[in-house]
Amino acid sequence: MFMPVGTQATVKGVFPRDLREMGAQMILANTYHLYLRPSDDLILRKGGLHRFINWDGPMLTDSGGFQVFSLSGMRKLDNDGVTFRSHRDGSKHRFTPERSIQIQHNLGADVIMCFDECPPSGDHAYVKDSLRRTHPWAVRSRDEHERLCAHGPSSNTYPHTPSLFGIVQGGIYEDLRTESAQFMTGLNFPGYAIGGLAVGENKPDTDRAVSWMDQLLPIDKPRYLMGVGDPLDLLHGVARGVDMFDCVLPTRLARHGAAFTADGRINMRNKVFEEDERPIDPSCTCPACSTHTRAYIRHLLHVEETLGMMLMSIHNLHFLLTLMRQIRASVNEGRFTAFAAKWEDRYVGQPA
């Protein structure tokens, strides 16, 4: 499945109703951002994320680690955790594995993540040293999670305690990925994320690292490739044993005028679409394609009307969710390889 990202407790420009209607199975929220505003304590008082945003489906929260470690000059790392300053107002904060898990329990998600470091992948020595922090932090995350679970759910929005996923790091290095996968699977988490592979490395390196994971992670537990949302990356990930994906890409591209179509990505701001009476994608059944033309949506984007960005976001998400439904059907029917080859041949052809 592909999981739309609701960083600030909302998928940008899309109503929860629209997400339900297009078949979103699970959505994400961001621990770092929600901790800063409005605060996990406030969300807990409001009954947890599900009630706060009126979403009755499953939710996943990240640990906040990626956002904290992306602050580079605004944070200080040690073996116990990380001290950082808010990107908004410069205020000082500290995350440890225990604090990250506490915040995620307060938010009330169904799947939560271990606190980890997401290191730059180009330095083997640094990535190896990073595992010496990430692995003990996974143990501490698990122990804090089990302690909180012993006291029951912290929100009244769901009758169960959340599932905690481990995160495999190791950059683009097979020896480190193997070491991390073996350590994480030894902790027997109910699911495993593959982290650190959407941070600037090239596609061949990503594909190789995911292929290693296919041989190392349990086949009877979900595998989650973090931060990946390009249609071809979804196909390639599934071919290498991945089950779950998330990314801000579809809505971010939408806000800049880029649309997914069965014939490749197009820029809806281009003048060639000024009088185009076709929908964004003639094969798509989303609300944008069912009711509006390329010409109209291009106009909305050029005059910076919010509706244009909303329609584009709905379309791009609908496109990916439809693709994942088609992938699931092809897997269940034993025809994934043929489906993927045919789909990719068309997508990488001449754009519409």
Image (cartoon, grey):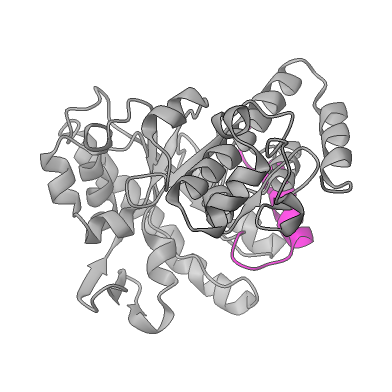
Give coordinates of residue 347: x percent, y percent.
Answer: 82, 42
Give coordinates of residue 102: x percent, y percent.
Answer: 22, 49
Residue 227 makes an appearance in the image: no
> Which quarter of the rendering shows the N terminus?
top right
- The image quadrant that residue 239 belongs to is top right
Q: Which residue is farthest bottom? A: 73
Which of the pair 20/276 is nearer the observer? 276
The residue at the point 52 percent across, 49 percent down is: 251
The residue at the point 29 percent across, 75 percent down is: 84
In the rendered view, tell whether residue 68 sits above or below residue 161.
below
Residue 10 makes an appearance in the image: yes
Which of the pair 104/144 is nearer the observer? 104
> Is residue 204 within the magenta segment?
yes
Q: Which residue is farthest front? A: 275
What's the magenta region? 198-220
Give coordinates of residue 266: x percent, y percent.
Answer: 73, 51
- The image quadrant that residue 238 belongs to is top right
Q: Is residue 148 left or right of residue 279?
A: left
The residue at the point 51 percent across, 38 percent down is: 3
